[in-house]
Amino acid sequence: TMYQGSLTYPTCDEIVNWYVVEKPLLINDHELSFFNSTYTQSEHYPKTGNAREIQLINARKIKRICNVTSRIENLFQNPAFYFLLCFAGLGYAFWKYYGQIPANKDQPIKGNIWTLHPLVSIISVPDKETFSRHCRIGILYVNWVTQMIVECIAFRIEGYYRDISSVYFALIGIAISIPITYSVGIFFRLYSKRLNENQRQMHFDSTRMLKYAKIFKIACISIISVGLLFLFWQISYLVGVLAKQWIISFAFGVFLDLCILDPLAIWVAIKNDKIADLLKFRGFYFDG
């Protein structure tokens, strides 16, 4: 249980976050003897030792945070841990099976501006030699893993001390993931540009083309893998209600990003060619 309280000695400033276990923790006789000889004689409370009468709650908020366990035990009791396992498993399956749908080279890519939307691009735009579904899926998961990390850190820093909405953390995650996604997308665009230049050469070098493809995919996989490892390490700190709030925050962020912000950006891109060109730098769709 956690509450904001005061120091145990004058001037008793209310600048302390107190964490109190509801059930007593067992100690041995030696530890009890050391405690009594060291702490029970207080200059401020010579008769009562370190004990004090129960005080009024006043305006303090008392929060039930978690059960007291080790970090390893907490990790396996944490719903965020199993949510992350499912996320990683579904992501791999999505990359492995959906990303390998054979390209229909006879089907031209129509100039539909809605293919700027990540999911529409992945589902409806067929593979090209310079523009595979694997690459687009990689960019999408880089975006999501970045949001997860940002929200996880935000909950660790602020979640214990403030009653802040999960929506607030979702917005922070989206805002910070935008430059990351654009950085990977621009790299993807440069990679595609190099491939197109390679294709225009008189002697086409397929080995060089595969080299660029591997570099891009390795970059995406590395970012995602490091991000997931970092999250597995961090989520053991998200105890109790914070773990559930983290899941809700990420789910809301994905909904907000894909269902509201992306359609809004595409609607603006329909009105403005410069915005459309800017959105293409994310790498989900462009004229290769």
Image (cartoon, rainbow, N blue to C red):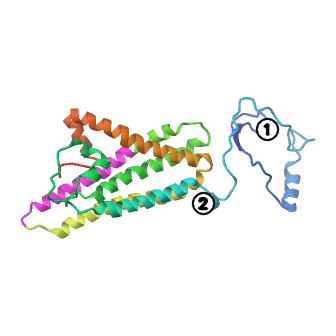
Label 2 SS:
helix
Where is residue 95? Give x, y as percent: 35, 61
> Is residue 283 among what the camera can see?
no
Q: Residue at x 57, y 54 (%)?
A: 79
Q: CA distance from mark 1 to mark 2?
A: 39 Å
**Is 145 situated above or below 5?**
below
Determine which of the numbered discs, if any, sits on residue 9 in the image.
1
The residue closer to the viewer here, 85 or 200, is 85
> In this rendering, would 226 be left or right of 282?
right
The kind of residue on which mark 1 rests is Tyr
Label 1 SS:
loop
* First reached walking from the N terminus: tag 1 or tag 2: 1
- 1 vs 2, front mark: 2
The kind of residue on which mark 2 rests is Phe
Where is residue 144? Give x, y as percent: 41, 50
The residue closer to the viewer here, 37 or 86, is 86
Q: Which residues are magenta?
A: 177-202
> In this rendering, would 67 be left or right of 80?
right
Q: Residue at x 85, y 39 (%)?
A: 52
**Label 1 crowd bin: few (<14), some (14–19), many (20+), radius 10 Å:** few
Where is residue 67? Give x, y as percent: 69, 52
Question: Residue placed farthest to the right in the image?
Answer: 47
**Label 2 crowd bin: few (<14), some (14–19), many (20+), radius 10 Å:** few
> In this rendering, would 123 be left or right of 222?
left
Question: In the rendered image, which quarter contains the N terminus?
Answer: top right
Q: Residue at x 74, y 36 (%)?
A: 6
**Is 277 situated above or below 23?**
above
The residue pinned by badge 2 equals 76
